[in-house]
C-alpha cells in the first residue's frame, strides 16, 4: 500500500489541529506538559515553528490510542499523523 504524502503546509495544518486537540482536554494537555516539559508559552511558540509542530506529532504518535482519538477528532485516517510527520523537519525517521 502506498503511503500518503503531505505538503509541509498541509502537515503544519494537521499539527495545529493536534495542538487544538491536546489543548481542548485538560487531562491530555497536562500529560503533554508533564511528559515533554512544555509550558503554555512553548505551545504558543510551536504554532510558528515547523520543527516544534513535528514534535507535537511525535508526541501523538507515541501513543496508539492517542493517534486514534486524534484521527477521529480531525476526521482523518489513523495513518495521517505519521504521513504529516514525514513532511516536517526531522520527519525522515518515519
Image (tube, grey):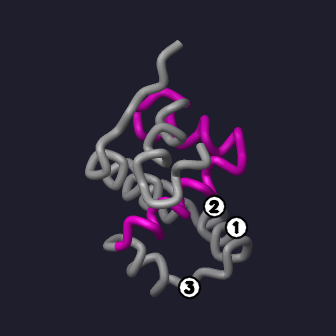
Image quadrant occupied by the C terminus: top right
- Locate residue 23, reporting x and y percent: 49, 65
Residue topped by disc 3: 39
Residue drawn where x is 70% and y is 67% of the image? 31
Residue topped by disc 2: 28
- Locate residue 34, reporting x and y percent: 72, 76
- In the displayed structure, 36 sits above or below 82; it is below
Residue drawn where x is 39% and y is 53% of the image? 17
- Asked if marks 2 and 1 touch (Cβ < 8 Å), the reply is yes
The residue sitting at the front extreme is: 92
**Label 2 secondary element:** helix
Circle 2 packing at 10 Å, graded few (<14), some (14-19), many (20+), is some
Q: Is residue 62 magenta?
A: yes
How far separated are the C-alphas under marks 3 and 2?
14 Å
- Locate residue 19, reporting x and y percent: 45, 61
Give the foreground label among 3 and 2: 3
**Label 3 secondary element:** loop
- In the displayed structure, 75 sits above or below 58; it is above
Apparent side of residue 47 relative to residue 34 in the rendered image (left or right): left
Apparent side of residue 80 relative to residue 48 in the rendered image (left or right): right
- Asked if marks 3 and 2 touch (Cβ < 8 Å), the reply is no
Circle 3 packing at 10 Å, graded few (<14), some (14-19), many (20+), is few
How far separated are the C-alphas under marks 2 and 1?
5 Å
Magenta residues, as a range?
A: 49-78
Image mark for residue 31: 1
- Count how many numbered circles sit on residues in the image: 3
Apparent side of residue 52 relative to residue 28 in the rendered image (left or right): left
Image mark for residue 54: none
Q: Is residue 41 magenta?
A: no
Amino acid at each position: 500500500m502506498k503511503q500518503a504524502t503531505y505538503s509541509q503546509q498541509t502537515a503544519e495544518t494537521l499539527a495545529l489541529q493536534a495542538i487544538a486537540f491536546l489543548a481542548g482536554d485538560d487531562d491530555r494537555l497536562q500529560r503533554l506538559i508533564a511528559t515533554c516539559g512544555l509550558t503554555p508559552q512553548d505551545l504558543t511558540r510551536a504554532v510558528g515553528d515547523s520543527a516544534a509542530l513535528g514534535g507535537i506529532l511525535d508526541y501523538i504518535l507515541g501513543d496508539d490510542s492517542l493517534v486514534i482519538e486524534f484521527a477521529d477528532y480531525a476526521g482523518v485516517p489513523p495513518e495521517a499523523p505519521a504521513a504529516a510527520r514525514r513532511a516536517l523537519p526531522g520527519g525522515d525517521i518515519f
